[in-house]
Amino acid sequence: MVGLVVVSHSRPLARAAVALAAEMTKGRPLAVEIAAGLDDLDEQTYGTDALAITEAITAADSGDGVVVLMDLGSAVLSAETALELLDDEVREKVVLCPAPLVEGLIAATVAAASGAGRDEVAAEAMAGLAGKESQLGPAPSSASPSLPQEHDGLSATVTVSHPHGLHARPAARLVAEARSFDGALVQLRNATTGSGWVPATSLSRVATLGALQGHDVEIRASGVRAREALGRVAALVVADEASLSTGAVGPTAASPGVAVGPAVHLRETPINLPDHPSLGPEPERQRLTQALDETRRAIAQIRSAEPGIFDAHLLLLDDLVPAADSLIAQGLPAPRAWQTATTDLAADFDSLTDPYQRARAADVRAVGDQVLRALIGAPAPAVTTDAPTGDDAPPAAAGGGVLIAADLTPARAALLDPSRVAGVLLAAGSPTSHAAILIRTRGLPAVVGAGPDVLDIPAGTEIALDGTAGEFAVAPPPPVLASFRERASHEAALRTAARSHASEPAVTVDGVTVAVGANIGDVGDARAAAANGADLAGLVRTEFLFQDRATAPGVDEQVAVYRRIAEALGGRRVTLRTLDAGSDKPVPYLPAPAEANPFLGVRGLRLSLLHPDVFADQLLAVVRVAREAPVSLMFPMVTTVDELRRARLLLDEAVARDGAGRPPDLRVGMMVEVPAAALRAADFVPYADFLSVGTNDLTQYTLAAERGNAALASLASGLDPAVERLVGEVCRAAGDRVPVAVCGELAADERAVPRLLAAGVRQLSVAPALVPLVKQTVRCVEVPR
């Protein structure tokens, strides 16, 4: 991607211009460096420094070149001097652009973020004044090339609905979308004003349309994927302002894929407690026990979908029983006692200051609701399929309808039937919520945070949603609907091709082999990983063995389970992560101190080092299994080199305790989840056979954005530039000495995979069902040399 450098006499001016340009490309990474002023500590010094410009060019260059924009004449002289200080190889890729600084920077930013080459970026910057010229008249020396008026392709006319028209931000989004269709020619004209045709790929030219709210914009497209390009651009012209929001409020991608179908709603029968007196403590306890047993059986049936989530639900049941028992002893009937206990515990979580712990109130209410329905015989929520009939009814969806709900509990998400539900549209929610994770495991497209208005959409209304882009349309016009349908067909073809080649290696266009593994939570996941063509188990979450019990599992029990996982994978390498628990994921027999912020507390390797006896048993079990199968041992939440050294010493003691020498194929590595570990990766390399980046935690620690907090969803989704830099630091430190893997959610993000591979990542680990698609994504990537 082309980098940009802003050279200005004033640092505040440069920063303001960069901030304004960044508003056009929120959510998309771009290297923009500033070389402004003469003193880093004094904002009021004015001037330019050639050496600072040289450093900025070097920092902005990722291999595709750099475009430099300057404010005043002496800035040009400083930039030319800076070029002389650069190596010939770098200098050849730098363009000094005489475009106006602010307008040029905005146009260049949109073009660069969309993948344009440096010459095209510079040309877009040079055309930055086109919008003003169309309003005020061109400068005497300027000229704007006209587009040919002939056209052979598809066309549509749509009405602008933005209150402020196609102003900078929606226009920038439109241009970025148009640029994503290589081989398609997309053009626009303002039919209301009678303007000429302009290319949809040029922000400066789109600005000349002067398209206001209510104006009709004519769109035409030809070439490869013309219909899809036409629909996507039309959707952005007619979309309201909220759908373009990139802040905490607004539609957010939650699960990839495209769905088109009639709206269906979740019908939830209200729970009305019967006004019956208690039958006595013992009969009421028996009623509660039966309901608890029924709920535990129901959870056990769906537990494999996400063991960590449902193991936590089972623990919550145990936490609620004593309080309910006490209330039953005081004369309350079981339903009333259970409801009171649930309400009180949820309120306790609601009162906490930590966002993660507050979010657990939803889990309490969800599992409490399950038991309460079992107690009184109330039916579980069901999907309504009531829809209009007759000539005006939309056609039935082959794969079911689009489910609309305020939010979903994990249990409801795990039970979604792909034969009845084509996709999910939630008014609230977060892409990192438990429900979203489970929707992804079901393979259903989903958009969350769509706002409360979607709850009023009548059943049967045609809904189209794209869970990859975070877009949806209600009763879309024909060109928009056709675009979504074309995307759906394209995705279906990709999935079919991916499944047919799932067992084959994932090799990039230029011959780089990438291992694609699976994240595993139990033996069932291991079987699914093998069936989906996983090259290895990139992460085995061993905590499923330690939770929901009163004592730690013994060595023999652990060996038996790890062996079954290895057998299910048929000789593939198995990466066993040591116990990753702590105060945010408590284990009753491994007490940790009370903490105000458990995410920054005693968890992961820190907890294991505090309980060496339990840790020693797990290490011994790993050593024994490593004699029978290729095993990698991975330590979580490593922050300092001393922690890694101590863990390795305990591993050496486990090898000695086993008495048969070190297994020859045992590899030892660590997770990089803490920014400090990423920045000091070179210090860890001598002690590690591999490094695995946990992007979920690394992202939330880097951005100070708890990943379960729906209000911060936009920060937690996608590969943030700061996180990308940290991943790059890890890869550079690792070099050719140790491989680098990614086992977080980003490993399955088709937009992030090319950037991860470009940084140097050579192993990805994802949910078992996603392995074929990720392999197919890798096969389409060309890794920069």
Image (spheres, grey):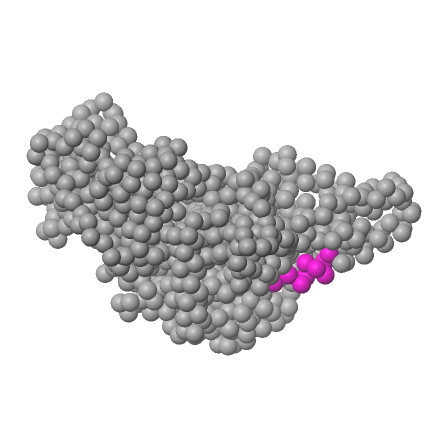
Quick one: 287 or 424, which is closer to the camera? 424
Residue farthest along the top direction in this orientation? 44
Task: Report if residue 299 lies within the magenta region.
Answer: yes
Magenta span main SS: helix
Residue 549 visible, this angle: yes
User: In the image, 262: left or right of 207?
Assistant: right
Percent of width and height locating residue 218: 31, 45
Task: Report if residue 720 lies within the magenta region.
Answer: no
Residue 21 visible, this angle: no
Please tell me how many numbered marks the rendered image carries.
0
Percent of width and height locating residue 758: 30, 57
Q: Residue at x 41, y 67 (%)?
A: 493
Q: Residue at x 44, y 70 (%)?
A: 496
Figure check: 432 above or below 516: above
Q: Residue at x 65, y 59 (%)?
A: 552
Figure check: 685 above or below 21: below
What residue span does the magenta drawing correspond to?
A: 295-308
User: In the rendered view of the protein, which quadrant contains the C terminus?
Assistant: bottom left
User: In the image, 634: left or right of 69?
Assistant: right
Q: Residue at x 43, y 74 (%)?
A: 500
Quick one: 725 or 628, which is closer to the camera? 725
Residue 735 occupies which quadrant of the picture?
A: bottom left
Quick one: 761 or 596, which is closer to the camera? 761
